[in-house]
Amino acid sequence: MYERFPEPSDHEALHKGMPQTGRQLLADVSLPAAVIHEPALAHNLAWMQAFCEAQGARLAPHGKTTLCPELFRRQLDAGAWGITLATAPQCRAAFQHGVRRLLMANQLVGQANMAIAAELIEAGADFYCVVDSVENVDQLARYFSARGLRLQVLIELGMPGGRCGCRDTDEVMALAERIDSEQALVLAGLEGYEGVVHGDDPERSVRAYAWQLVEVAQGLERDALFEHPAPLLTASGSAWYDLIAGVFREARLGQQFVPVLRPGCYVVHDHGIYRQAQREVLARQPALQRGLKPALEVFAQVLSLPEPGLAIVGMGKRDIAHDQLPEPLRRYREGDERARPLSVEGWRVTKLMDQHAFVRLPAGDEAMGGGRVRVGDIVAFGASHPCLTFDKWRRLCLVDARLEVMEVMHTCF
Amino acid sequence: MYERFPEPSDHEALHKGMPQTGRQLLADVSLPAAVIHEPALAHNLAWMQAFCEAQGARLAPHGKTTLCPELFRRQLDAGAWGITLATAPQCRAAFQHGVRRLLMANQLVGQANMAIAAELIEAGADFYCVVDSVENVDQLARYFSARGLRLQVLIELGMPGGRCGCRDTDEVMALAERIDSEQALVLAGLEGYEGVVHGDDPERSVRAYAWQLVEVAQGLERDALFEHPAPLLTASGSAWYDLIAGVFREARLGQQFVPVLRPGCYVVHDHGIYRQAQREVLARQPALQRGLKPALEVFAQVLSLPEPGLAIVGMGKRDIAHDQLPEPLRRYREGDERARPLSVEGWRVTKLMDQHAFVRLPAGDEAMGGGRVRVGDIVAFGASHPCLTFDKWRRLCLVDARLEVMEVMHTCF
């Protein structure tokens, strides 16, 4: 029951959503669709850049959150120092979209991935990756010396019970000596990730870890083990960046190191774990005015109202992060050009399947602002965390306050 | 820190994996990568087609599992009657890759989605969708009559506490009368989905539901409410298809209806919920020889061995289904052209982050077949369920028994 399998002329047209600019989200766009609100996005971009500058730190936003070149461009336009990424293919995608300074905050493992990094370096990228083992250092030295290239590496300092990274200062120093002995490798800094901290007093643990990073970096500097003229000292995910920045500032690194912060989720923020984390940032830092704003939502339509109190919505695990159940935020009538939001008070997602959400409605929803829910009504959902919503979409709609599509952004997952 | 944002000439080259045919998976492919084993795939394609034919049913595999045109082609080549899909953009993607008979087992809601369906019908697609409410029937009738088109619809029969679908026979009959009064709509069959069955004796409930479908369809036929010359009677996901097929066969529908089964996951099977479901199918159907074989795996590399008993692997929630934690299946040395599998006995994934898996190793792994684990070792993981692994990849490697890449398949999510 097929005739042929042509290569479509516009392969991109095949993907879900397929929004076009100039369309109205509530009338002209195939839903479900991922939506970024431009005013909140602009606020977040400026907010985090100003925060980093006030702290005397550089910002290399973690690009794995979005893998969206249009957002990388906005981050760099706002003043970011570079883009952080998690894998070699991610670095290639960013570079091919014009990002020149690539901080791969992860180990570079495997011949095929090393080949990608080598090509980026040959093409002029300012590329960094991290190392935490002699075995990997030897692999990298062998590969890059055979290619006649030099690779900039940062040693990763981890923590006991954490993820990657050397577990103590002795391991770091031994690894630095090994790197020093390899002509193909340039020790360019020290890297850490405090996001895997655990224990009863995480705030105290994060600060202690940040101080350990400072001290280990100073030890490497004392022993003249950095080959890079301006070694990097870098840490921070999206929850504890204020504490990392605070310690780096207190340590007065200014002349000695380039302090680099790497939050990623801030750019669109979220409606779950990072909203909570941001409340804690603001509680710790009373000088900060107005925090980040959630900018990413998924819009979807009511498909069926099969029983009293139950709406089935056309949005599932393929469309939105599902570590936590998404949160209904607002409702609209399809085609409402004035985009008047209706209440979803008492609405609750109870289950998510691949392509469907089960939404429990309160009794007597007829009385709610805007009238009885209808098949075709459009619901805006928030979720946590943004990385796991972005990776479900090849296209996202950037919309203005009237929900008109200003720009179609794309991702490179 | 960027120069320009060119539109790359081969946008596809930017995505993770980027495998090429003729490469060896263990030496030449950037990992992590999604891998389909050709021998198991070929077995599954033939197995399910033979099962459906033996039952006298047509097979319209659910294409939302893979959204992979190369797999649709193989399913149709094996004898499938059409492809089932979940959304209008999915139907468009399948049609643009040559699939002509499209069974959208979901409600068609929203002007933009109706426009996609209308374009498919105008282009010659044999398109069906389902309806379960007067509201949606009225919306569809208005849209398609304004376009001067006729839309083939199936009524969905649901179940109390289930997902979409009319909750009883009266509702179905009333909806059929409504459809009958609309010139733009053609009642082409009855649809159900038993996968949301619940209760203490699901086997009994599924059979009862299948019989209800038969009886309701026969009632519609008696009342001459089907306008389609060969109305469809369709149900079945990937767990209970044998029971649905059995009832449809016992009911001797042959001449009266076209029975259509819609399993999707069978094509690559899995290492979790569907492996268990298939064991139950084989226990219920002793005549069936050898069941389905898991064909989909994700290959990833050990990035770090930071503590005794812990491996950090470069694979995360972005790469593999994570409703259940993935299962390590085998290990290889990078570059081993003979692809000799090493044991992962006692290995266990304990945590998955966006880009990393934490794998707990047994004490004394040095003694395990093939020697001590090394940074760079390649681990094959299985997961459940396949839909949520496919949607993480734009490209998948089809490999032969020697792990050479035979074909690069793509997805249209």
Image (cartoon, coloured by chain):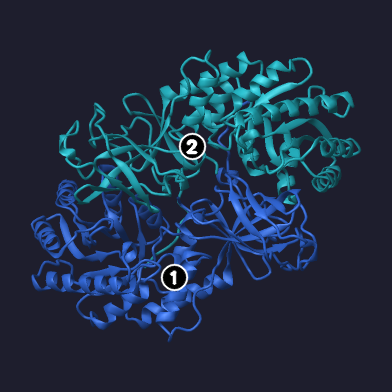
Chain colours: A blue, B cyan
Residue B297 at x, y = what percent?
39, 35
Q: Is residue A86 left or right of residue A233?
A: right
Q: Is residue A10 left or right of residue B228?
A: left
Q: Are marks 1 and 2 on the same chain?
A: no
Residue that lies at the very extreme toward the right in this rendered image: B181
**Nearer to us in this view, B239 or B207:** B207
* Chain bearing mark 1: A
Q: Is residue B79 left or right of residue B127?
A: left
Q: Which residue is mark 1?
A: A277
Tell me if I can see residue A115 in this picture. no
Tell me if I can see residue B229 in this picture. yes
For the point 46% across and 25% down, the residue is B41
For the point 24% across and 40% down, the residue is B377
Between marks 1 and 2, how big is the CA–CA gap?
Answer: 33 Å
Q: Which residue is mark 2?
A: B386
Q: Amino acid at mark 1?
A: Ala
Residue A183 at x, y = what percent?
11, 56
Quarter of the image holding residue B150? top right
**Nearer to us in this view, B215 or A84:** B215
Residue A60 at x, y = what percent?
36, 68
Quarter of the image holding residue A298? bottom right
